[in-house]
C-alpha cells in the first residue's frame, strides 16, 4: 500500500527496475492513496523491496509477499533472466524478509515446543531401549528443533538480536527438556520393572553406537545444518530436513537420559559430546551458508555490526567444536587402536593354538576394555577354543596368556574356554 505523497516515487522505482505493475486507488480514507500489485521473480524480491524502501515503503506500511503458482508472460521471463544473471549466487534464494518470516513460522509456541520435545524424547528413549531403529526414526519426525536451530543463524546475519536470542534460548531449552524427559522416563521404566532387571543398555546396538562418537558425527551435523538452512532460503519444505536435524539431536539426548537413569558415566559423556558437537556444528554451518549467500541487514549502516557479530559467533562456535573434536579424534584413534589390537591378539592366539595342536580351533575371541575417557585399557581377554573329542587341553591357558601378554606388552587377564567339537 502506497502512503500519501509516495505514489510517484514508487512508480518511478518500479519503472527503473523494469517491473510491470498495476496501481489502483485506495478508497478507505486512511493515509494510503493507492495499492500497487506486481509479479516478481524470486531473485528480484529483495532488490525491489530495497528500492521501494528508498522510495518510502517501510515497515510502517503494508507489503504482502504471496507465492504465485505460475506467471505466463514473455516480459516476465525476460525479467526473470535479467535478475538471475545479476544475482551473485543464482536466483533460487528467497528474500531477507521471507526468510525471517519462515523462521517465525517455524518457531512454535513455548507450550507446543516443550510438549512435542518431551513426546519425541520419550519415544526415542523407548526406541533405544527396544533396540528398534524404526521407533527411533519415528521420534525424529515429530521433533520441533529446526526452527530454533535456524533462527539463531538468521538472527545473526540480518542483525535481529531478538530472533538470535530466541533461537539460542529455545535450543538450550529443547536439549535440556529432551534429556530431562528421557531421564525421567528411563527411571520410571527401571523403577517399575518395565524393563528386564538385568538389562545392560550398552548391549543394545541403538545405544552402544552413541557411546563412542567419532569424527563422522561432524559430517552428520554439518550436513543437517546446511540442508536445513538451504531448505529455508530456497523456499523448499523444511519438514523432511527437520528430521535430519532431529537425527543429530534427539537420539543422543535420549541416550544421555538413559545413561543418567542407569548410572553409566561413559554413556552420559559420549552421548553428551554428540549432542554438544551437533548443536554447535548445525549452528555454525547454517551461519556460514547464510553469510556466504549474501544475506545482510536491511539497512546498510548495520552491516558492520552484523559482520562483527557473525565473525565473533562463528569464531566461538568453531573454537568450541575444535575443543570437542579433540575428544572425537581421541575416540576415533582409540577405535583404530582397539581394532588393530584385537586383530593382533586374534592372530597371536590362532598361531599359538596351531602350535599347540593343529586340530585346535579359535572359535571366538572377546576383548574387554575399561575406562570412561579414551584411551581405554584392555583388561581382559576371553578365548573360546574348539577341541576334538578326547584331546587334552591342559596347558593351553598359560600358553595363550604368555602369548597375548607379549603382544600387549603388559599383564592382562586371559580366560580360556574349551568346547568339544565333534564333526560327523
Image: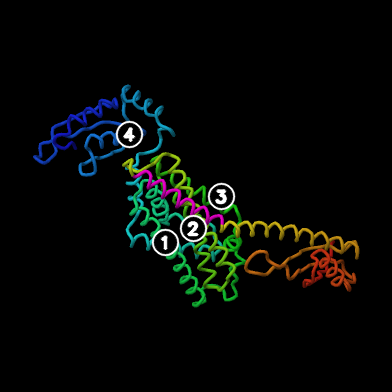
C-alpha distance separating marks 3 and 2: 14 Å
Q: Which mark is residue 249?
A: 2
| Residue 310 lies in the magenta stretch | yes
Q: Nearer the viewer, mark 4 or mark 3?
A: 4
- For residue 35, above or below residue 206: above
C-alpha distance separating marks 4 and 3: 35 Å
Is 324 on the left-hand or right-hand side of 73?
right
- For residue 376, above or below residue 62: below
Q: Which mark is residue 219?
A: 3
- Dot 2: element: helix
Mark 3 crowdedness (10 Å alpha carbons): few <14, some 14-19, many ≥20: few
Asked whether disc 1 touches disc 2, contact meaning CB atoms under 8 Å apart, the reply is: yes
Label located before the other in sequence (3 or 2): 3
Asked whether disc 4 touches disc 3, contact meaning CB atoms under 8 Å apart, the reply is: no
Label located before the other in sequence (2 or 4): 4
Name the residue beneath numbered marker 1.
174
Q: Nearer the viewer, mark 4 or mark 1?
A: 4
Q: Residue 355: give x, y in percent of width and height.
A: 91, 63
Residue 169 quadrant: bottom left
C-alpha distance separating marks 1 and 3: 22 Å
Label located before the other in sequence (4 or 3): 4
Residue 209 quadrant: bottom right
In this orientation, which residue lies closer to the viewer: 146 or 126?
A: 146
Label located before the other in sequence (1 or 3): 1
- Who's the residue at 21% across and 31% down the image? 10
Name the residue beneath numbered marker 4.
47
| Residue 393 lies in the magenta stretch | no
C-alpha distance separating marks 1 and 2: 10 Å
Amino acid at each position: 500500500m502506497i502512503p500519501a505523497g509516495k505514489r510517484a516515487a514508487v512508480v518511478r522505482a518500479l519503472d527503473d527496475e523494469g517491473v510491470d505493475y498495476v496501481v489502483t486507488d485506495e478508497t478507505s480514507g486512511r493515509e494510503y492513496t493507492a495499492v500497487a500489485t506486481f509479479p516478481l521473480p524470486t531473485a528480484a524480491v529483495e532488490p525491489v523491496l530495497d528500492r521501494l524502501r528508498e522510495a518510502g515503503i517501510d515497515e510502517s506500511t503494508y507489503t504482502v509477499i504471496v507465492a504465485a503458482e505460475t506467471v505466463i508472460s514473455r516480459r516476465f521471463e525476460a525479467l526473470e533472466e535479467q535478475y538471475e544473471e545479476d544475482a551473485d549466487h543464482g536466483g533460487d534464494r528467497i528474500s531477507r524478509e521471507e526468510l525471517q518470516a519462515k523462521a517465525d513460522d517455524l518457531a512454535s509456541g513455548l507450550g507446543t515446543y516443550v510438549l512435542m520435545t518431551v513426546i519425541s524424547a520419550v519415544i526415542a528413549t523407548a526406541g533405544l531401549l527396544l533396540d528398534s531403529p524404526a521407533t527411533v526414526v519415528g521420534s525424529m519426525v515429530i521433533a520441533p528443533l529446526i526452527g530454533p536451530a535456524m533462527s539463531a543463524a538468521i538472527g545473526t546475519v540480518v542483525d535481529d538480536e531478538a530472533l538470535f536470542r530466541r533461537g539460542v534460548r529455545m535450543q538450550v531449552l529443547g536439549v535440556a527438556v529432551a534429556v530431562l524427559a528421557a531421564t525421567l522416563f528411563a527411571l520410571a521404566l527401571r523403577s517399575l520393572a518395565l524393563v528386564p532387571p538385568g538389562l545392560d543398555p550398552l548391549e543394545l546396538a541403538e545405544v552402544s553406537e552413541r557411546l563412542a562418537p567419532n569424527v563422522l558425527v561432524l559430517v552428520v551435523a554439518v550436513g543437517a545444518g546446511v540442508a536445513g538452512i538451504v531448505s529455508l532460503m530456497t523456499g523448499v519444505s523444511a519438514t523432511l530436513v527437520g528430521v535430519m536435524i532431529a537425527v543429530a539431536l534427539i537420539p543422543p539426548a535420549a541416550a544421555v537420559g538413559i545413561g543418567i537413569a542407569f548410572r553409566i558415566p561413559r554413556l552420559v559423556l559420549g552421548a553428551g559430546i554428540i549432542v554438544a558437537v551437533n548443536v554447535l556444528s548445525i549452528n555454525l554451518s547454517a551461519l556460514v551458508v547464510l553469510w556466504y549467500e549474501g544475506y545482510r541487514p536491511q539497512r546498510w549502516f548495520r552491516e558492520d555490526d552484523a559482520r562483527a557479530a557473525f565473525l565473533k559467533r562463528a569464531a566461538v562456535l568453531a573454537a568450541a567444536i575444535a575443543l570437542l573434536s579433540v575428544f572425537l579424534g581421541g575416540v576415533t584413534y582409540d577405535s583404530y587402536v582397539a581394532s588393530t589390537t584385537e586383530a593382533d591378539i586374534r592372530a597371536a592366539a590362532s598361531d599359538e593354538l596351531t602350535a599347540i595342536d593343529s586340530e585346535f580351533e579359535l572359535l571366538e575371541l572377546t576383548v574387554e576394555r575399561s575406562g570412561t575417557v579414551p584411551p581405554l585399557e584392555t583388561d581382559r581377554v576371553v578365548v573360546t577354543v574348539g577341541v576334538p573329542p578326547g584331546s587334552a587341553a591342559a596347558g593351553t591357558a598359560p600358553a595363550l596368556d604368555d602369548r597375548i601378554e607379549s603382544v600387549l606388552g603388559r599383564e592382562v587377564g586371559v580366560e580360556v574356554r574349551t568346547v568339544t567339537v565333534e564333526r560327523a
